[in-house]
């Protein structure tokens, strides 16, 4: 999925020096190399915010993100020094999956040098770009009698949040000094950033008088759309402040590229002269389908349930080399590795991280139980809580038995998932569940299990099965490959094929979950909720996370990685 990263900061330390005014901060964003064979990549730099210790940068950065694949960025903030080396103002790293999973899709980190850096992600929508040429005529001077204003313009995207409407700056033009009829350099803006590809979505154009202290003065504004701008080339728009005209905005150029227009399609068709025919209703293309990022951005919670195989085929857990052996030196067995790696990815998408842990395939009191609670609590906290419940099960009096049947686990998870979604819907929220099943063997009766999957296919549930050990898992692959109605609930992954790399396991295990979530809600005609918008003061500020990363700044403005920028997760993490 394509995501946009935006940044702002507050209360940065002034590093300009005595009697040198206020720092002019900008940020450089680098994608950290997290897998062997890859290198860190400079995503770009923001614009410089003059004389500001709380910059709200306009520049956004687009990335491709997949659930289960770590993506880490480093944000380094510098004070621009025109004659000399730029001064560091602080840096931190962000895991994009954690930011996406946070409420409001925003994370904040405290900087050691002072201040806070905020990272926000959102879905990138649409394609193509707008090339916009603007000038203005007879702007109202805001500088008094002896001076003229220094105008620049900004473009803003309208964001409809939960219960409010805000404008987010996405572009800032160059400043034209001492000119009330300025002509600015052409602006080239991605439509995914400006209006999410919707040419009729409102955008805001604001003209400001640039002030060296960063407190720019509004000279006029107008609300319009990209579609309207393209029709007004050679024409004008009135700029206003508090309803009064303050100047004229001239539309010199408004070219949209990279978006296939209906008129373009029609122009490609050769049409021979024909006699008049009966008019038909014009087809209106449907809006773009919602994505995983839309639902998560609207506050959809990802709940998790874990089910663990305690059949006798796992071997005696007291003997080294068996699948459930708990090493005294802390070395993780394959069950523990799968639990920690997968839950560490899913955890940020669940605000309370309370997970039920079930077991199957063991005897209690001489009776084989195909669904029983692991540990003393109905739900446990986080990945460590799941591990504790797993460990405690071995001292609960069970006898590891068989056969491998998790039909009851599926029904229990489906019922809990539906109850969670119903409760969330009653509160105007959304809830979806991922069931992680860890098993050392194929199910004893795959066709019966397939029937159970058919029965629960309308639940808000994804079923992820991880096969542990060297058993023949061909019947498990049958569950993954089988057509269960119109649904694909199941993803099966064999642990041994990914046993040397946790990233490989989580990427493959969680690959289908985003589409499964979207399919459930769309099939039930449930649209994403409005994006959650959080004020800075409502965001928990975490401690700075630094990484070894050095950059070289060329005289031509090019930035390259000089050293560091590696966080390879080679092996198990």
Image (cartoon, rainbow, N blue to C red):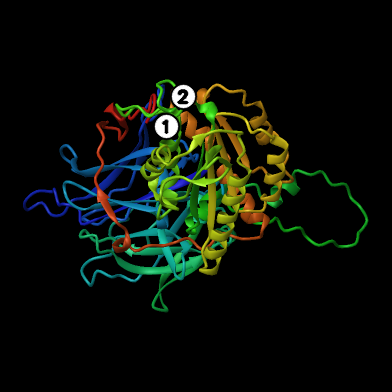
Q: Position of residue 114 (x, y in %)?
A: 17, 51
Q: Position of residue 4 (x, y in %)?
A: 44, 47
Is 133 in front, or is 121?
Answer: 121
Q: Which quadrant would residue 326 be assigned to in this image? A: top left
Q: Which residue is mark 1?
A: 337
Q: Visible in this render: residue 186? A: no
Q: Quadrant of the C terminus?
A: top left
Where's residue 377, x and y in %? 41, 52
The total number of labels drawn is: 2
Q: In what element is the residue under mark 1?
A: helix
Circle 2 is placed at which residue position? 499
Work out whether residue 511 or residue 149 is closer to the camera in this orientation and state it. Answer: 511
425 is higher (above) or lower (below) than 492 = below
Instruction: From the viewer's perspective, tell me whether residue 203 is left or right of residue 519.
Output: left
Marks 1 and 2: CB-CB under 8 Å?
yes
Q: Quadrant of residue 512?
A: top right
> Which residue: 49% across, 51% down?
302
Quick one: label 1 or label 2, which is nearer the N terminus? Answer: 1
Report crowding for label 2: few under 14, some 14 to 19, many 20 or more residues within 10 A (C-alpha): some
The residues bearing labels 1 and 2 have C-alpha atoms spaced at a distance of 9 Å
Image point (23%, 66%), residue name: 147
Q: Furthest-front residue in view?
A: 366
| Foreground residue among 72 and 442 | 442
Residue 63 in percent (x, y) is at 45, 41
Asked which secondary structure carries label 2, the reply is: loop
At a point 44% along the width and 31% down the height, the residue shown is 503
């Amino acid at each position: 999925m394509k995501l946009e990263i935006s940044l702002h900061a507050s209360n940065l330390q002034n590093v300009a020096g005595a009697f040198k005014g206020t720092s002019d901060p900008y940020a450089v964003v680098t994608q950290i190399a997290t897998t062997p064979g890859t290198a860190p990549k400079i995503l770009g730099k923001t614009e410089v915010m003059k004389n500001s210790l709380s910059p709200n940068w306009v520049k956004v950065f687009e990335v491709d993100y997949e659930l289960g694949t770590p993506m880490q960025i480093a944000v380094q903030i510098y004070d621009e020094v025109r004659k000399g080396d730029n001064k560091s103002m602080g840096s931190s790293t962000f895991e994009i999956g954690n930011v996406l999973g946070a409420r409001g899709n925003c994370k904040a980190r405290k900087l050691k040098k002072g201040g806070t850096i905020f990272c926000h992600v959102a879905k990138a929508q649409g394609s193509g770009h707008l090339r916009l040429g603007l000038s203005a005529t007879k702007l109202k001077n805001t500088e008094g009698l002896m001076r003229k204003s220094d105008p620049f313009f900004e473009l803003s995207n309208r964001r409809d949040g939960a219960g409010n409407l805000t404008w987010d700056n996405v572009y800032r033009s160059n400043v034209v000094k001492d000119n009330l009829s300025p002509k600015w350099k052409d602006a080239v803006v991605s439509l995914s950033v400006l209006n999410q590809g919707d040419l009729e979505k409102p955008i805001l154009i604001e003209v400001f008088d640039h002030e060296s202290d960063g407190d720019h003065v509004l000279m006029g504004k107008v609300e319009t759309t990209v579609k309207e701008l393209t029709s007004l080339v050679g024409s004008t728009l009135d700029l206003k402040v508090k309803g009064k005209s303050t100047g004229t905005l001239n539309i010199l150029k408004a070219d949209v590229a990279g978006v296939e227009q209906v008129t373009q399609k029609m122009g490609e068709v050769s049409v021979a002269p024909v006699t008049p025919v009966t008019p038909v209703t014009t087809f209106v293309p449907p809006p773009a389908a919602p994505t995983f990022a839309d639902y998560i951005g609207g506050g959809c919670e990802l709940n998790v349930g874990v089910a663990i195989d305690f059949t006798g085929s796992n071997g005696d857990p007291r003997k080294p080399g068996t699948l459930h052996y708990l090493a005294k030196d802390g070395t993780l067995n394959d069950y523990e590795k799968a639990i920690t790696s997968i839950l560490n990815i899913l955890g940020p998408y669940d605000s309370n991280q309370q997970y039920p842990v079930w077991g199957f395939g063991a005897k209690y009191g001489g009776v084989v139980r195909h669904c029983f609670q692991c540990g003393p609590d109905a739900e446990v906290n986080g990945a460590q809580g799941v591990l504790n419940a797993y460990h405690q099960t071995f001292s609960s009096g069970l006898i590891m038995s068989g056969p491998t049947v998790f039909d009851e686990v599926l029904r229990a998870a489906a019922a809990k998932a539906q109850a969670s979604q119903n409760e969330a819907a009653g509160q105007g929220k959304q809830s979806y569940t991922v069931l992680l099943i860890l098993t050392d063997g194929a199910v004893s009766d795959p066709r019966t299990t397939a029937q159970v999957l058919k029965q629960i296919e309308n639940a808000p549930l994804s079923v992820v099965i991880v096969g542990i050990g060297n058993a023949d898992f061909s019947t498990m692959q049958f569950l993954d490959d089988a057509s269960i109605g119109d649904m694909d609930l199941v993803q099966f992954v064999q642990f041994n094929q990914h046993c040397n790399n946790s990233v490989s396991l989580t990427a493959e295990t969680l690959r289908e979950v985003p589409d499964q979530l979207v399919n459930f809600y769309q099939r039930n005609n449930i649209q994403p909720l409005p994006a959650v918008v959080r004020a800075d003061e409502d965001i928990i500020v975490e401690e700075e996370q630094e990484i070894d990363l050095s950059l070289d700044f060329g005289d031509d403005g090019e930035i390259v990685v000089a050293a560091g920028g590696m966080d390879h997760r080679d092996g198990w993490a």
